[in-house]
Image: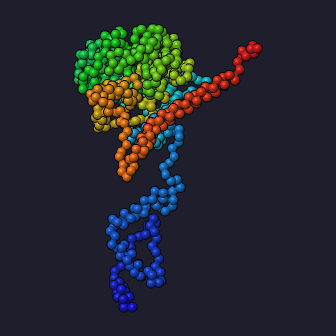
C-alpha cells in the first residue's frame, strides 16, 4: 500500500490538466476509462509517458503514415476501384510505337538490359499518351448540306452568315490590284500571314486581329516569300538574289550565292532553307549560322515546281518532262525519279504523314501516288487542269484552276466525283496555302488576297510544345533556344527516317576485318575450352572429358534447335499453301459445265 500511495502522490488533484487536441474522424477513437485499476496501472503510465515524449513532427509523421493507405478514403472505407483506371485496347493500339524485340539467349547481357529498358520506356509512353488522349476532346467537323444539296454549291457568304462572329471575321478579301499577283505563306503557329506581290510589294499581317506588322516595296520583282523558324524573320526571293528581312521590314542579309531563286521551302527541324533556281540549282542555306550547306546541279532545266515532305524533309521537284525527283542535301544525285505525267508538272503537294503525294500536270490530270511504293493510287481528269495544289493538316486538297479554287476531300481513300467546296476569285490564282490549326485557306491572286472558310481543314488539337499559337514573346524566345539545341543535322536526312535506328552491319564487318589485320588474330573468335583444374580428384581424365563433352553439346543444341524451328516454319507454310489450294479448288467456275 505504501508503494501504491507513493505513486498516487505523483499526480495531485491540483495539477493543471493538459488540454487534449480535438478528435478527428480519421483517427482511432480514444479508449474509454474503466472503473478498474487497469487504466491506472503501470502499462497505462508507460504509454502515457511515451506519448508525452513524442515530438510534434513524429506525431504528424505517424498520422500521415496512418492516412497513407491508397486503397482507403479518409473515412476509413476501402476503395471500390483500386489501382489505376483501365485503358481501352483500341486507344492503346492507336499509340503503339513498335513491336517487341527478340532478346539474345545467353551473351550480350548489356544489350538485354538496354532492350528491356527501351521497351519499358516505350510501353510507359504508350500508356501515358493513351491516358492523355482524354485531354484532346476537340474534333474536326465538316460541312454537311441538306438532303439533296451539294456542299460545293454553298457560297462563302452563306457560311459566314451561319457561323459565329469570331469565325465570320476569318473570311475577308484584301483588294491589292496594283502589285499582284501574290504569293502566300502562313507562319508555323498560324498567326501571321506573309504576302509577296509579283511587282515588289511585301506585307506581314496578323490576319486574326487585322493588324499590319510591316509593309515594304523592294522595287523589283518578287518570285516567292517564306517564313523562317519564327515570325521575326522571313526570306524573299527577288529578281537577282535572296534577301532576308525581319518583322519590321529591315533587310538583314543579301545572299548573292543564291541567285535567280524561283521557289523556296523551309525545313523547321533542320533550320534549312531550300531554294530552287532558274539555273537548275537546288541549294540549302543553314539559317542558324548563315552558311550554304549544299549546292546541287539537278541538270533538269528551270525549277519552278517545288514542295517538301514534312515527314522526312525530302525535297520534291517537278520538271518539264513530266518527272518528279526526290532530293536530299547529302547526295548529289536524285534519290528517286518518277514519271508522273505525259506533259510538264505544274504543281506537287505531300501530306503531313509523308505517305501520299498529289501532282498535277499539263495533261490536265490530277494524280495521287503512294510514296512508300512509288505507285499511282488515283487519277482524276480536270477539264482545265490544276495550277496550285495545297494539302491541309486534315487531308483536304485545294486545287486552283484559273480563277476558281476547288477543295477536295479524301482524294486517296475513295474515288472523288465532285469537289467538297468551290469559290471564284477576281483574277487568276497564283498561290494557295492552308492556315495551320485553323479552318482557313489563304488564296493569293491577281487582285489581292482572299481568306476562305473551309470547315474541317485545320487540326483542332494544338501541340503547345511544337507550335503554340498563343505563346508570348518570352515563350517564343525559350522555344527558339530549345529548337536550336535540338536541331537535326542535314546529314541525317534520308528517304527512310527509321534507318537511323538500325545497325549498319556492312560497316561493322569492315571495321572487324581491319581490326583483325591490325592485331594479327581475331579477338571475337571462339576460344578453345580449357577445363579448370579442380582438387580432390575432380580433375581426373574422365571428368575432364565429361566436361568437354558437355560444352561441346551446347553448340549442337543451338544448331538442332534452329533446325527444328526452320522445319516447323517450312511445315506451317506448306500447310497454309495446301489449305489455300484446297479452297481455290473447291470453288466452282462457270466453265466447269463444259468439262467432261
Q: Mark yes or no: residue 134 visible.
A: yes
The residue most toward the bottom is: 2
The residue most toward the front is: 541
Return the residue nearer the eye: 254 or 405: 254
**Quadrant of the image for the C terminus?**
top right
Residue 126 vs 365, above or below: the answer is: below
- Apparent side of residue 592 relative to residue 307 in the rendered image (left or right): right
- Apparent side of residue 545 relative to residue 155 in the rendered image (left or right): left
Residue 18 vs 3, above or below: the answer is: above
Give x and y (percent) for residue 519. Answer: 27, 30
Residue at 50 percent across and 34 percent down: it is 560
- Apparent side of residue 458 relative to residue 268 in the rendered image (left or right): right
Return the residue nearer the eye: 526 or 203: 526
**Quadrant of the image for the N terminus?**
bottom left
Give x and y (percent) for residue 329. Answer: 32, 20
Return the residue nearer the eye: 588 or 78: 588
Give x and y (percent) for residue 484. Answer: 29, 32
Amino acid at each position: 500500500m505504501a508503494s501504491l500511495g507513493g505513486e498516487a502522490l505523483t499526480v495531485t488533484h491540483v495539477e493543471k490538466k493538459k488540454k487534449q487536441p480535438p478528435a478527428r474522424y480519421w483517427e482511432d477513437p480514444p479508449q474509454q476509462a474503466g472503473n478498474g485499476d487497469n487504466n491506472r496501472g503501470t502499462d497505462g503510465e508507460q504509454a502515457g509517458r511515451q506519448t508525452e515524449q513524442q515530438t510534434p513532427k513524429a506525431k504528424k509523421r505517424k498520422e500521415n503514415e496512418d492516412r497513407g493507405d491508397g486503397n482507403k478514403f479518409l473515412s476509413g472505407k476501402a476503395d471500390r476501384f483500386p489501382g489505376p483506371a483501365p485503358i481501352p485496347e483500341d486507344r492503346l493500339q492507336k499509340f503503339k510505337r513498335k513491336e517487341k524485340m527478340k532478346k539474345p539467349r545467353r551473351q550480350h547481357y548489356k544489350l538485354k538490359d538496354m532492350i528491356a529498358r527501351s521497351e519499358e520506356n516505350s510501353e510507359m509512353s504508350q500508356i501515358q499518351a493513351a491516358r492523355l488522349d482524354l485531354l484532346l476532346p476537340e474534333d474536326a467537323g465538316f460541312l454537311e448540306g441538306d438532303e439533296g444539296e451539294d456542299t460545293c454549291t454553298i457560297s462563302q457568304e452563306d457560311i459566314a452568315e451561319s457561323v459565329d462572329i469570331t469565325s465570320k471575321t476569318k473570311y475577308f478579301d484584301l483588294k491589292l490590284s496594283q502589285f499582284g499577283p501574290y504569293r502566300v505563306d502562313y507562319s508555323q503557329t498560324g498567326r501571321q500571314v506573309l504576302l509577296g506581290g509579283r511587282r515588289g510589294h511585301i506585307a506581314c499581317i496578323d490576319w486574326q486581329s487585322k493588324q499590319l506588322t510591316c509593309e515594304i516595296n523592294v522595287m523589283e520583282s518578287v518570285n516567292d516569300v517564306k517564313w523562317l523558324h519564327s515570325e521575326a524573320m522571313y526570306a524573299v526571293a527577288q529578281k537577282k538574289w535572296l534577301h532576308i528581312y525581319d518583322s519590321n521590314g529591315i533587310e538583314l542579309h543579301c545572299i548573292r550565292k543564291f541567285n535567280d531563286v524561283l521557289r523556296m521551302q523551309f525545313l523547321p527541324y533542320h533550320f534549312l532553307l531550300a531554294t530552287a533556281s532558274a539555273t537548275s540549282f537546288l541549294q540549302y542555306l543553314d539559317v542558324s549560322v548563315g552558311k550554304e550547306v549544299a549546292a546541287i546541279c539537278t541538270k533538269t532545266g528551270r525549277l519552278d515546281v517545288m514542295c517538301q515532305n514534312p515527314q522526312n524533309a525530302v525535297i520534291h521537284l517537278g520538271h518539264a518532262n513530266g518527272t518528279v525527283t526526290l532530293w536530299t542535301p547529302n547526295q548529289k544525285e536524285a534519290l528517286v525519279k518518277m514519271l508522273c505525267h505525259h506533259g510538264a508538272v505544274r504543281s506537287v503537294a505531300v501530306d503531313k504523314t509523308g505517305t501520299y503525294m498529289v501532282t498535277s500536270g499539263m495533261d490536265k490530270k490530277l494524280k495521287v501516288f503512294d510514296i512508300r511504293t512509288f505507285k499511282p493510287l488515283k487519277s482524276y481528269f480536270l477539264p482545265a487542269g490544276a495550277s496550285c495544289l495545297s494539302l491541309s493538316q486534315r487531308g483536304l486538297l485545294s486545287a486552283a484552276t484559273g480563277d476558281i479554287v476547288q477543295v477536295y476531300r479524301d482524294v486517296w481513300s475513295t474515288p472523288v466525283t465532285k469537289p467538297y467546296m468551290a469559290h471564284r476569285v477576281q483574277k487568276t490564282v497564283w498561290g494557295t496555302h492552308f492556315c495551320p490549326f485553323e479552318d482557313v485557306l489563304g488564296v493569293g491572286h491577281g487582285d489581292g488576297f482572299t481568306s476562305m472558310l473551309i470547315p474541317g481543314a485545320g487540326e483542332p488539337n494544338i501541340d503547345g510544345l511544337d507550335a503554340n499559337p498563343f505563346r508570348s514573346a518570352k515563350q517564343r524566345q525559350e522555344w527558339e533556344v530549345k529548337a536550336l539545341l535540338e536541331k537535326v543535322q542535314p546529314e541525317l536526312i534520308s528517304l527512310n527516317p527509321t534507318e537511323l535506328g538500325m545497325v549498319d552491319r556492312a560497316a561493322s564487318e569492315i571495321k572487324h576485318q581491319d581490326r583483325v589485320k591490325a592485331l594479327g588474330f581475331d579477338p571475337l573468335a571462339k576460344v578453345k575450352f580449357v577445363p579448370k583444374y579442380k582438387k580432390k580428384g575432380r580433375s581426373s581424365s574422365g571428368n575432364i572429358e565429361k566436361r568437354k563433352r558437355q560444352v561441346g553439346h551446347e553448340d549442337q543444341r543451338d544448331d538442332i534447335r534452329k533446325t527444328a524451328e526452320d522445319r516447323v516454319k517450312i511445315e506451317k507454310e506448306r500447310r497454309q499453301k495446301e489449305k489455300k489450294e484446297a479452297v481455290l479448288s473447291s470453288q466452282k467456275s462457270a466453265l466447269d459445265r463444259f468439262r467432261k
